[in-house]
Image (cartoon, rainbow, N blue to C red):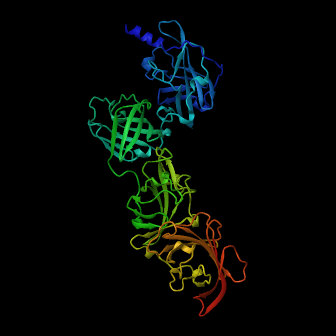
Amino acid sequence: MMVGCRLVVILSLFMLVIPSTDGASCAFPADLTGDWWSSKKGEVTFTTTTLSNYNPCRKPEDCSGVTSTWTCLASSGNKYFIRSDPFEVPGTGTTAYVYACLYMYRLSSTKYLAYQGPKAERQQPYNDYVIPSRSLTYALSDLCDLDENALPASRHNLFIRNDSTLSAETTCPAELLGNYMSDNNGQCNVTVDVCTDRKRIAVDNMGCDDDNDTSDNMFFTGNGTLSCVYSLQERATTYVTLYSIEDRHNDSLTITFTCISITLNDSTVLIRQAPNECYKLDETVREYQLEPNCKSIGCDFSENLLGSWTSNRKGDLVISQSSIAGFPPFGPDCLTAECTTQPTAYECYLAKGSRYLVRSARTTLLDKSVRIYLCLDFTSVTKTKIVYYQAHAAKDPVLLDYLTTRNAALSVESIDDICTVDSPYDAALYSILLNTADPTAGIQDCPSEFEAIYNTTDTSCDYTLTTCEHKTRIKLSATSCQRRPFYSVQGDVSCIYTTNVGSTTYLTLINNDVNVDGNDTYKFTCIAFTGSDKLLTFTQSPRGCYEGQAPDDANTTTFVYTHLGMSRPRGVQLDHRCRCYCRSYRSYYYLPSHLVLLL
């Protein structure tokens, strides 16, 4: 009776519609020839035009009598349209075929990423993505109907050359890096170590089962090691294919590949698993929880960096032993929610010399799950003043700052993967940290070019500019000007740091106003200037200087001090006399000149 029922089921699956045929032939990629592991089907063999031992059923026992050898009929790009050898349909005396489409993406000469079409899953006994038929053939377009721009992550599988499984190892996803504990859903204690080797998961399930049955164990192993061979991310879920290197608990291990899905709940790692492939992991299956058992892989900041700091570009932040808090990961021009909702806390991830690579928790950017990486290179000037650079080649196009966003499923093995810019950096892009408790401790002497008194006589903007009274301060005697230097209401700024490249000097100033609004007045200003005995020209930028800023940049307000008799530039020209005192001489001298404010 059971046999009769089975025949009815099988017969109902063979379509009688005669589809189109293109009569085409194809060849698999040359480096596929040979023996491979399929994470989905086990050991298979490729020739130029055939694939053998690739069972058309998800469970081989359900396809007794159905051939497992396929021929490549047609190909287009990454798509390979395949048909099984003919086989006899039980109880009918007729011959049938099974059709499928393989999407093959070369990762290396020993590893291919694969997806199987058609889009719809065939039910029992196949339970896989195939079409059985007694007709002649199907066309490639009938089976290869998946959208290559939106391939479902849960349907991925791998082909790995069977003599190169170790070379297929890759760094495990960032979410797995660490040491963890689990109670195996109340059954026993499990330890998971992804610290000792970032490419491998060492699992101790010992004591969970006394009968060598590991089917309910995490990663389907007792006490063994698994390699991460591939991972990819879809929204908030990361999918990982694992290869079992050894299992010292179960000598009769039959599960060579395991696919897991990972989601995060605060610090807890939630894992779902399935043998061979991530089949139906997006449905309700058993879930395991990994709790951090120790400090995850990371680094510690140098002792001189620890404490509360004020950054000219980022505001107040705190550097602790292994993290930075209060660092907005976006530029001042980005005011959208994509920027302002990003995390401001970062863990120290990798370090090399004065460089530190820090990363955010998992976050969403343009509907994708990412982590934000910052490469920071610190140099201590004094105990209360530090210069740092964000060592990235270009601004992120979304966050408009010098940083790197990376798929959250991808890990970073080396600091050099992110920190791709070497010193010396663009001189204009330095940033300053001042001790928050006493930022004035970072004040230093102003450049000698500012050692002068400029007397203006214009009635709409009558002021003097001088550093003669205080060598560390630049002061304006009046503040009636609508546009004035240094974004200061009180007209009182102090020099913090200076560096130069060629004839251009970059100077950071701190505003001594009691309050600033961040719109017309700012706590910090950076100017780019060039100066000599007869000419002083500078441009200014709130917070910090920008890439390409020049003393005569037409894109920003430019201040020019020049001798009387020069042609009148655009803007408001203000007559004044400049009284300078040169420390190298014992006398005063007077230079008639103009102050020109370009608006």
Q: Is residue 299 above or below residue 269?
A: below
Q: Position of residue 530 (x, y in %)?
A: 63, 75
Q: Is residue 111 visible?
A: no
> Which residue sits at x=63%, y=29%?
76
Q: Position of residue 473 (x, y in %)?
A: 51, 80
| Direction from residue 435 to residue 458 in the image, left or right | right
Q: Position of residue 68 (x, y in %)?
A: 51, 19
Toward the front, the furthest residue is 459
Query: Which quarter of the figure has residue 29?
Result: top right
| Direction from residue 345 to residue 535 in the image, left or right | right
Q: In this view of the protein, which residue sits in the foreground, 376 or 202?
A: 376
Q: Is residue 133 above or below residue 43?
A: above
Q: In this view of the protein, which residue sits in the foreground, 423 or 224?
A: 423
Q: Is residue 166 visible?
A: yes
Query: Which quarter of the figure has residue 591?
Result: bottom right
Q: Position of residue 565 (x, y in %)?
A: 72, 83
Q: Is residue 304 above or below residue 573?
A: above
Instruction: Tell me the quarter of the image containing the N terminus.
Output: top left
| Direction from residue 286 to residue 64 in the image, left or right | right
> Which residue sits at x=40%, y=40%?
262
Q: In this view of the protein, which residue sits in the foreground, 141 or 41?
A: 141
> Which residue sits at x=41%, y=59%?
324
Instruction: Tell me the quarter of the image containing the C terminus.
Output: bottom right
